[in-house]
Amino acid sequence: MEVIHNEIDSARANKKLDKDQRVSLAIEVGSFIGQMFCQEMDWEWLQVLDPDGTEAIAVVSGNRALALDPIRWVHELISDKKRANNCLLLFNMIHAGRLPPSRPNSYVWIG
C-alpha cells in the first residue's frame, strides 16, 4: 500500500497529467486498491448506491457496514491536491480493526 500511496503522490505532483490520464490512473490504481481490500480484509466488490443516490461499484466489508468506491476515491486524491492522501492511513486503520462506528448493512461510506 505504501507503493500506491507514493504513486498517488507522484500523480498529484505531475502537472502534465490531463483529465483522461487521471481517469485512467484512477481506474487502474483504484481497482488494485479495491482488490487489496478484498484479499487482505475479506471485503467484496458489490454494486451499491453511493451517497448521491447513483449506483457505484464499491468494495464493502463482510457485514456490509462499510463501503468504499476505490476508483472515485483515488480520482479525488489525484485531482484534489488540498485533500490529504490518506490511502495508506485508511488501509492500515481498517486492517488493524480500527473501524469507524457503523451497523451491519448500513453501508457507511469511507474514503
Image: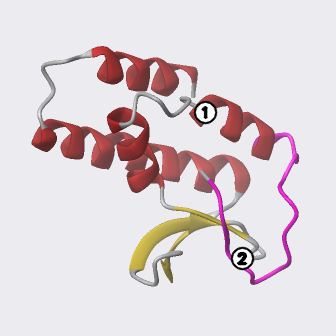
Seen at 50% across and 75% down, the residue is 50
- Residue type, numbered disc 2: Arg
The location of residue 93, given as percent across then percent down, is 79, 39
Majority SS type along the magenta span: loop
State whether residue 46 is above or below residue 35: below
User: Do the numbered discs 1 and 2 sit on residues whose CB atoms are within 8 Å?
Assistant: no
Q: Which residue is mark 2?
A: 64
Seen at 46% across and 17% down, the residue is 6
- Residue type, numbered disc 1: Asn
- Is 98 on the left-hand or right-hand side of 62? right
The region drawn magenta spans 95-110
Mark 1, other Cα within 10 Å: few <14 / some 14–19 / many ≥20: some
The location of residue 49, given as percent across then percent down, is 49, 82
The location of residue 96, given as percent across then percent down, is 85, 40
Q: Secondary structure at mark 2?
A: loop
Q: Secondary structure at mark 1?
A: loop
